[in-house]
Image (cartoon, helix red, strand yellow):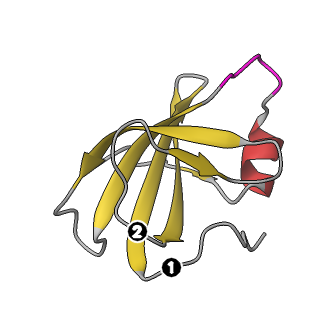
Amino acid sequence: MANHYLKGPLKALIVLGWDKRLWRMDANLPFPPSPGLGIRLDTYELIQVDSVVVGDYGYDVTCICTIEGDDGEYSDARLEQLGFELAEAGYP
């Protein structure tokens, strides 16, 4: 699913911890992220940047994130719809 919210010149790796596993998504951000920033994935889905890492190979930045307001309504299928894939090898 192409995410029209994530367009910009900054190549970012989004890493999300959910359900005791790591999920990842490539994104392009319009400006440099900082801890506390909310990134909208869809109309009602928002993730929060907990920390930012610079220097990961192939990316300008890596955002370590959590789901904002996670009330247990997420599923593997929903994360995949939002553009995440399971990070089999973990991070980094």
Question: Residue 48 — which label?
Answer: none
- Which residue is at the far bottom? 9
| Residue at the image point whose x is 78% and y is 53% from the top | 42
| Residue at the image point whose x is 29% and y is 75% from the top | 58
Out of 76 and 62, give the one closest to the viewer: 62
Out of 58 and 65, give the one closest to the viewer: 65
70 on left or right of 61: right
The image shows residue 51 at horizontal and vertical percentages of 31, 39
The image shows residue 68 at horizontal and vertical percentages of 62, 29
Q: Are marks 1 and 2 in contact (CB under 8 Å)?
A: yes
Q: Amino acid at mark 2?
A: Phe
Query: Label 1's element?
Result: loop
Position above or below: 57 against 83: below
Which quadrant of the figure contains the N terminus? bottom right
Check disc 1: other Cα within 10 Å, few if <14, some if 14-19, many if 20+: few
Q: Tell whether position 40 is magenta.
A: no
Q: Main secondary structure of the magenta part?
A: loop
Query: Label 2's element?
Result: loop
| Residue at the image point whose x is 83% and y is 24% from the top | 73
The image shows residue 19 at horizontal and vertical percentages of 61, 23
Q: Which residue is mark 2?
A: 31
| Residue at the image point whose x is 22% and y is 62% from the top | 56
Sequence-wise first label, 1 or 2: 1
Q: Amino acid at mark 1?
A: Gly
The image shows residue 16 at horizontal and vertical percentages of 51, 40
Position above or below: 28 against 54: below
Out of 87 and 71, give the one closest to the viewer: 71
Tell me the magenta residue range: 69-73
Q: Which residue is mark 1?
A: 8
